[in-house]
Image (cartoon, rainbow, N blue to C red):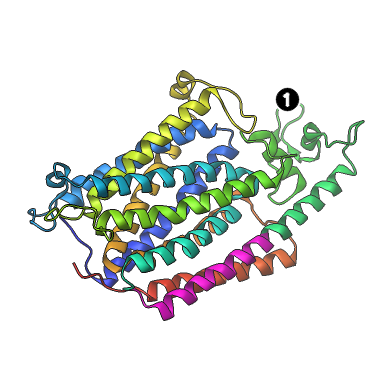
Amino acid sequence: MYLVESKGGAIACMLLSLFFLGTWPAIMTLLERRGRLPQHTYLDYSITNLLAAVIIAFTFGQIGPSQSGMPNFITQLSQDNWPSVLFAMAGGIVLSLGNLSTQYAFALVGLSLTEVITSSLTVVIGTTLNYFLDDRINRAEILFPGVGCFLIAVILGSQVHSSNASDNKAKLCKYSESYKDGTGAIKVSESQESVQRKGDLENGSFRVDKAKAGTANFLIELENRRSIKVFGKSTVIGLGLIFFAGVCFSLFSPAFNLATNDQWHTLKAGVPHLVVYTAFFYFSISCFVLGIILNVSFLYYPVLNLPRTSFKAYLNDWNGRQWALLAGLLCGFGNGLQFMGGQAAGYAAADAVQALPLVSTFWGIVFFGEYRKSSKKTYILLVSMLSMFIVAVGVLMASSGHRKN
């Protein structure tokens, strides 16, 4: 079994995990904005998310000979360690609920704000729990100022969202002054008339250029194309989903910590603690099972006024499937690397990967046109938020300790 034992190796795992965990939500958002149903996307994601755990277990978990105190993955499957297994599976359940909630929150309130609030709640609650579960191996004088930085970042993030929402409302109001129907509602179909057309009109061929990101036309075209319609929906629903997901995310890492370190002494005498790879395997199984059950149900009983579909329709939906499968792999390997680093340097320090809004916001700006043509106030708040996250992740990583095996 391969173990990450050095502080440098743990930090490398955290940084790679940070990139993976910040990228997969952007892929899910991309598919939703292209019109793919979230139920179809999550089913594909669930398959490769479990596959990542299986790959990690049969590679890193099987390297080298088994030892009495730290058995290899296959050896541990037959041991009497069910109390720890149940903790691992509980962590997978709350993670699955959190991931499923954020998939809908991405559409309702945006990728960046969803990641900012959920990550900050995870750090404030989860990191505090992990600090005490890990017998305070992390340096409190560094760790908790880092937690404070996350709190400041979430406040700035809420201000960014409020400012950007006001900017978008102003764009749409300005647009509606010129394009309205008899009831005063925006004519979504008329948005195409303001888009520049190029080509050979005599031959009946022309190209319609996409609206520029950040414009009212862009917002309206996006609404037409996406699978979850957001115009007219209250942001209260989205914010409720975010805070529910944040609480779920704050619990999965402490549950995994209990599974691997047995701080509550639930195992029988002489039974080895679950190694990180075995715990992650059971963790991912419960995450997979719950995700499949809920999303198959959502095929026939959808939420948020999504169209009803079927399992057969899901099997035949190959539009963007490769991206959904990639998202599952990224999330699976990202979680695995986070746990590998946390087992070595402390799970409280490993929560530094919750600075993933740095990565998600980058993808949101580059690929989704978030914050394009926004006000100066929004840009100042955005830069301040990202700067605070950079400080926070550096401080949390600096608090890394070393676990005695």
Q: Position of residue 80 (x, y in %)?
A: 16, 45
Q: On the rendered structure, is 201 left or right of 261?
A: right
Q: On the rendered structure, is 88 left or right of 158?
A: left
Please state which of residues 181 and 373 is positioned toward the viewer in this rendering: 181
Q: Quadrant of the C terminus?
A: bottom left
Does residue 171 belong to the magenta stretch? Answer: no
The mark total stands at 1
- Label 1 crowd (10 A; few <14 / some 14-19 / many >=20): few
| Predominant SS of the magenta segment | helix
* Residue in the image at 30% along x and 56% along y: 258
Q: Which residue is mark 1?
A: 203
* Residues in magenta, as a range: 138-160
What amino acid is found at the position of numbered circle 1 in the picture? Asn
Question: Quick one: which residue is furthest to the right in this view?
Answer: 182
Q: Position of residue 99 (x, y in %)?
A: 47, 45
* Residue in the image at 79% along x and 50% along y: 169
Q: Quadrant of the N terminus?
A: bottom left
